[in-house]
Image: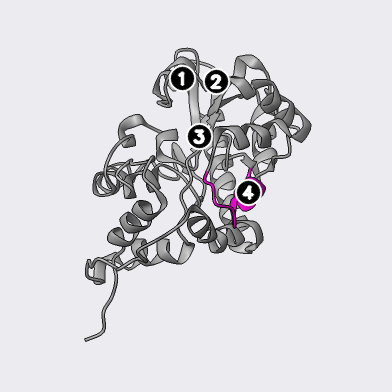
Amino acid sequence: MFKQMALVSLTSLVLAGCAQTHMTQTTATPPSSYTTKDLNEQQIQGLLWMQKSAEYRALCFQAFNIAHLRVKQALNSDHSKPLAVVVDIDETVMNNLPYQAWLVGKNQGYSGKTWQQWVNDEQSTAIPGALTFLNYARENGIRIFYITNRSDKVRQATLNNLKQLGFPDANNDHLLMKTTTSNKGPRRDKVRDNYDVAVYMGDNLGDFTQKFDGKSTVQRSQLANQYKAKWGDEYVVLPNPIYGTWDGAVLHYRWGANATQKNELRHQTLNSWHPK
């Protein structure tokens, strides 16, 4: 998963996503000056939700329970090739929230240097339900492939962390890392050359198809509608309100924008209600 900081609160996500049908589009007025520290502070509610809420754990268990059902169906159906499960790593099977929490209160955003330090510490933990599901799949003859946009520089640390946690198929042949592009399509194709994939799992829609890459928020929503029959079937999504390509779309993929510009873009995108 391509690591990019997305620093909006969970409340804003609910407001923008759930209430869009009956709220009018307006442009909020953000503060005239903002720092990265201020933006990082906005993560707290989403981080607390992911770290402390029973709802987050329930959604994770729900995702892996659905994946379990899909694997059982695949095992009981005809397939021309051996079966496989394809998963993203970060915020799909391994939890990196302590790194995100460390950024709060600091006047710096995500950086490759500090992210690499976190990965090399091998402190990621398992997402609720991930180990049980993947070990069930492997025990039933299904191979596991980890397709991640972590850099190959942290390959060994990633493998060590996966092995320490007890994840199956934690070896070089089954770990497909980012090379020259964050597009996961060619790596998915490589798996499909030799396997029938029972289920794909990820927290970012680019984990399922490259058609979402580089698209606007409107285009991504339209595509999500087009793929509605696949969600919970071939594709199983894990919750992540903290970062991801969804925020890139909000920012018009201006990842290099300064803190004030990012804040303005996020305010402009909100659908806000105004009393009469």
Is disc 3 in contact with disc 1, using a CB cutoff of under 8 Å? no
Dot 2 or dot 4, earlier in sequence: 4
Give the extent of the magenta segment: 96-109
How far across and how far down the image is residue 117, in percent? 67, 34
Which of label 3 and label 1 is nearer to you? 3
Left or right of 77 on screen, residue 224: left
> Residue 152's x, y, as percent?
58, 20
- The mark nearer the N terminus, 3 or 1, is 3
For badge 2, the amino acid type reads Leu
**Residue labelled with disc 4:** 97
Query: Residue 267, located in which quarter of the rendered image?
Result: bottom left
What secondary structure is marked by label 2? Answer: strand
Who comes first in sequence, dot 4 or dot 3? 3
Q: How far separated are the C-alphas under marks 3 and 2? A: 11 Å
Looking at the image, which is closer to me, 209 or 48? 48
Q: Which residue is mark 3?
A: 1
In terms of sequence position, does the residue under pointer 4 or pointer 1 come before the other? 4
Local SS, label 4:
helix
Label 1, on which residue? 187
Secondary structure category for the residue under label 3: loop
Give whichever of 111, 135 is nearer the camera: 111
Residue at disc 1, secondary structure: helix
Q: Earlier in the sequence, mark 3 or mark 2?
A: 3
- Asked whether the residues under the numbered discs 4 and 1 touch, taking CB atoms below 8 Å apart as contact, a structural biologist would say no
Q: Earlier in the sequence, mark 1 or mark 2?
A: 2
